[in-house]
Amino acid sequence: MKTPIIIDTDPGIDDVIAITAALFAEELDVKLITTVGGNVGIENTTNNAVNLVDFLGKDTPVAKGADQPLLNKLVSATKVHGESGVGGYHFETKEDSVLLSSKHAVEELRDAILHSNEPVTLVPIGPLTNIALLLKMYPEVKRNIKEIVLMGGAVKGGNRTPVAEFNMFVDPHAAKIVFDERINIVMCGLDVTLQTRISTDDVKEIEGYGKVGEMVSQMLSYYDSPSSTETEMSIHDLCTIIYLTRPELFGLKRATVNVVTEGEASGCTITHYNEEGHVQVVLDVDVEEFRREFIATFKKVHEILGN
Ligand code: BDR
Ligand code: CA
């Protein structure tokens, strides 16, 4: 039985890699992709999601969501992901893609969750604006959400400010709403994502994997995460997907997480470890296996696509 998931995303180079891995994972059934303003504006994140699904020959529906955080003004990350969100890469674009829903992401999320026979796993890998709106507007969806496996936050440190990770920083009010719900959350934050380093040699290897390898390596040649060095980088969002397909590679600890919404520490995720907490914080990963999984994923996608 495949796990039904919905990816909420702001593509974003590491988002593209995570979505690609999810769409070809035997263990996962991606029901829907919803977009949010984050790394770049909503028009670009939505175009990137639609173009990617199309490029990969899939028919997963995409729905456009919130263009701005709940209260703050959007802060983007074009320095990391480029003006378009996918570095210098150019997808072939189609007019009026059939993959794009005419409904708002929050409506599509509601329908997809309530109509699913199995409880759905939400995988937010951008700011949590859509997810917060969903939980406030349609709280009845909670009964059919299995868990939320998200990329965001950190027990220690930040990458957008000294104490805030980017996704939490962009929409701290939404993050607070989501973390304050008693829904099971798996938090893949910087504590683990910064351990999952991919080397430029790994990227060179992937470059040989046909059109998908070319796409990923072209995007990663641009990717300028604050955590990147000349030889290594962290593909943050991919952690959520590899956690779902290979959970045995990760070490977790239960906690409750309070999100700071105002002032200099806005977006900081204050983590209190305790056995009753509904958040499982991912703290450790088998780095070598993660790296092998990254390479194996794109080899497999190349073989399936056959070009
Ligand atoms: C997160 O911020 C974004 O730039 C990435 O796509 C990832 O979701 C890492 O902090
Ligand atoms: Ca992202």
Image: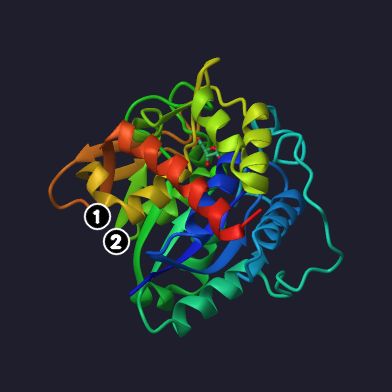
- Total numbered circles: 2
Q: Quadrant of the N terminus?
A: bottom left
Question: Which of disc 2 and disc 1 is earlier in sequence?
Answer: 2
Q: Which residue corresponds to mark 2?
A: 182
Q: Circle 1 — which element?
A: loop
Q: Which residue corresponds to mark 1?
A: 278
Q: Position of residue 48 (x, y in %)?
A: 71, 52
Circle 1: is it few (<14), some (14-19), or many (20+) Cα within 10 Å?
some
Q: Nearer the viewer, residue 81 or 207?
A: 207
Q: Which residue is drawn at the image coordinates 59% and 52% (left, top)?
A: 70
Q: Nearer the viewer, residue 26 or 47?
A: 26
Task: Give the Cα separation between the discs numbered 1 and 2.
Answer: 6 Å
- Look at label 1 and name its amino acid: His
Q: Circle 2 — which element?
A: loop
Instruction: Judge whether 194 appears above or below 103 on screen.
Output: above
- Look at label 2 and name its amino acid: Arg
